[in-house]
Image: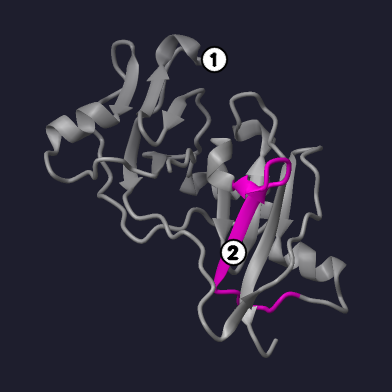
Amino acid sequence: MKVFVIVVLALVAYSPSAEAGIHCPCCNKWTPYFNRDKPTGLGDFELLSLHRKENPGQICAAPEIVSCERLTGLFRDSVSIAADYGLACFNFLQSDGQCEDYKCRYCCNYRYPSCPSGYRWTRYYNRDLPTGTGDYETLSLINKENPYARVCTDPIAIDVRVTRTNRPFQTSGENVCLAPNLGFSCVDAQQPDKQCQDYKIRFCCPNNH
C-alpha cells in the first residue's frame, strides 16, 4: 500500500509538526537521494520513472514513501509529490517564477505496526480534530491530557487509523508524519485540499506498564 508523504528536514525549523515533536517517517530501507534535474526550463522534475530509468536496479518496483528535500534552505515551493510519481515543480506556478533545486529518495520497506509477545496495544486515542492547523495525536499531548492513565514512555510501535473508516492511515493518501515514541501529526497546509482527515492512534507498550 502506497503512502504519500512530504518529508522536508529543513521544514523542522517552523512547521506545526515540528512543534508537536514529530520526525517522519518510519522506514527500514531508503534508497540514496537522487537529483537528476535542475530548475531550468520548465522547472525541476525528480520523477520516479526517470530516476528508475537513470539508476537501474536501485529503486524497488513499488515505493511506499517518497522523501524530498530542497538542497539548501526551506521547502517553500508549490510542488506535486507522490510515492509512485516523485516530485514535479513548475516554475510558472511559483510566486517568484523559479523553483528551487530538489532531491528525492524512496522508501522500499515501510514498517507496518505489530505488537509482539510481552507487549500489548493500548486503547485508541483521538485527542484532536483536524481544525486549526491539523490533527495532532502526539504521545506527549496524550500523556499530558491523561495524567492518571498515561501511555508508556517508549512505545515500540503505533497503529494509526482514519477515524471515519477505521482503516490504516495509508488509505487516506495524505501527507503525514509518525514515529512510535512521538506519535502522529497531519498538517492541513501539506494536504492538496488543505484539510486533514480525523485520525486515531494506539501504542504498543510492555505488558507490565
- Is label 1 in a helix, a strand or a loop? loop
Judged left or right of residue 46, residue 97 is right
Q: Is residue 47 above or below residue 161?
A: above
Judged left or right of residue 61, residue 116 is right
Tell me how far mark 2 sits from mark 1, CA to CA.
39 Å
Residue 82 percent location from the top left of the image: 43, 32
Per the image, the residue denoted by label 2 is: 158
Per the image, the residue denoted by label 1 is: 95
- The residue nearer to you, when weighing 154 against 39, is 154
- Is label 2 in a helix, a strand or a loop? strand
Residue 77 percent location from the top left of the image: 50, 25
Specify few, some or many for label 2: CA neighbours under 10 Å numbering under 14, 14-19, or 20 or more. many
- The residue nearer to you, when weighing 22 against 10, is 22
Specify few, some or many for label 1: CA neighbours under 10 Å numbering under 14, 14-19, or 20 or more. few
Three-letter amino acid code of the residue under disc 2: Ile
Toward which corner of the image does residue 105 lie, by quadrant? top left
Q: Which mark is residue 86?
A: none
Does the stretch in magenta take in 163?
yes
Can I make out residue 141 in this image?
A: yes
Residue lying furthest bottom: 208
- The residue range painted magenta reads 151-168
The residue depicted at 40 percent of the width and 27 percent of the height is: 100
Toward which corner of the image does residue 209 lie, by quadrant? bottom right
